[in-house]
Amino acid sequence: MIRTLMFLSHPSHRDPFAHRGAAAAELQAQICPAAAGYTQTRALDAQLEADQVPHFAGVAEFRFVDPGAALAFADKRSAIAPLLAPDARVVAVVTGVDHVVMRMPTHSAAPGIKGVYPFRGLAHLDSEAFSRRWLYGHGPIAALTEEALCYVQCHLLAPAWSAEESAFHAVTEIHWPDIAAARRGVGSRQMREDQGTDAQDFLEPGSVRLVFAEEETVRRP
């Protein structure tokens, strides 16, 4: 599955979406009929640190079967304005291929939360080298994240990778049962040492923007 993720800001760090449920689904179908699915992800008030302001307010996630349709829609960020709350805006776009590296049997039955980690790869890596290193080298290590229910990698499509304006090259998603488990997982030795050390081979230092969020599946693929 291909995803176009539109990262959203809001000056008051409030819910960046104007609608939920059926109302959001109807608007999404009008705005982007080519999308096979749509999810609204909202940043939680609770983040890694108690007083931390989220790096972004939410993510509008459109799923596609056709990569061409996904890339074409990525250039139409203004088209999603009817879905957004006043003053919310799109600040970054990632269109990539999803790889579900790990999913526990209990994941689909649990509401939970997810950590969203957009980031950039090292400058000397091209799309193919980055994807191979991240998926096959780092993937098995990150799949061991403590208490995680699901681990997904979204790899930027090659045409988008070559665009100089790409804010991010990839998005990691890790799902946990709750915020306490998420904080334990992020603070664990396994993530700090095993994952942190390995990530130095492909991840641009300082480029990660971690946000804890909840997702509303408006329309399933």
Image (tube, rainbow, N blue to C red):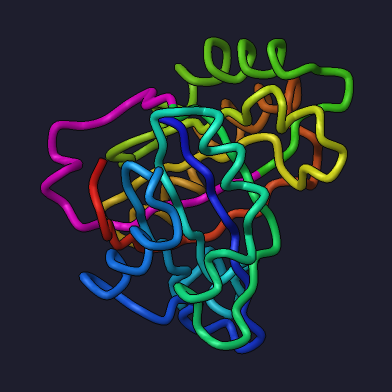
Expressed as whole percent of the image width and height from the top left, the position of residue 208 reads: 69, 47
Task: State which quarter of the image contains the N terminus.
Answer: top left
In which image quadrant can residue 161 be found? Answer: top right
Q: Which residues are magenta?
A: 99-118
Compared to residue 59, the image places residue 204 above or below, namely above
Residue drawn where x is 45% and y is 17% of the image: 140
Expressed as whole percent of the image width and height from the top left, the position of residue 186 reads: 50, 48
Residue 142 magenta: no
Expressed as whole percent of the image width and height from the top left, the position of residue 101 reads: 38, 23
Residue drawn where x is 48% and y is 76% of the image: 82
Residue 117 magenta: yes
Viewer-nearest residue: 116 or 146: 116
Q: What is the number of callouts on the image?
A: 0
In which image quadrant can residue 39 be found? Answer: bottom left
Expressed as whole percent of the image width and height from the top left, the position of residue 26 reads: 28, 67
Residue drawn where x is 70% and y is 63% of the image: 91
Compared to residue 192, the image places residue 209 above or below, namely below
Residue drawn where x is 46% and y is 42% of the image: 173
Compared to residue 209, the image places residue 66 above or below, namely above
Viewer-nearest residue: 110 or 159: 159
Viewer-nearest residue: 219 or 123: 219
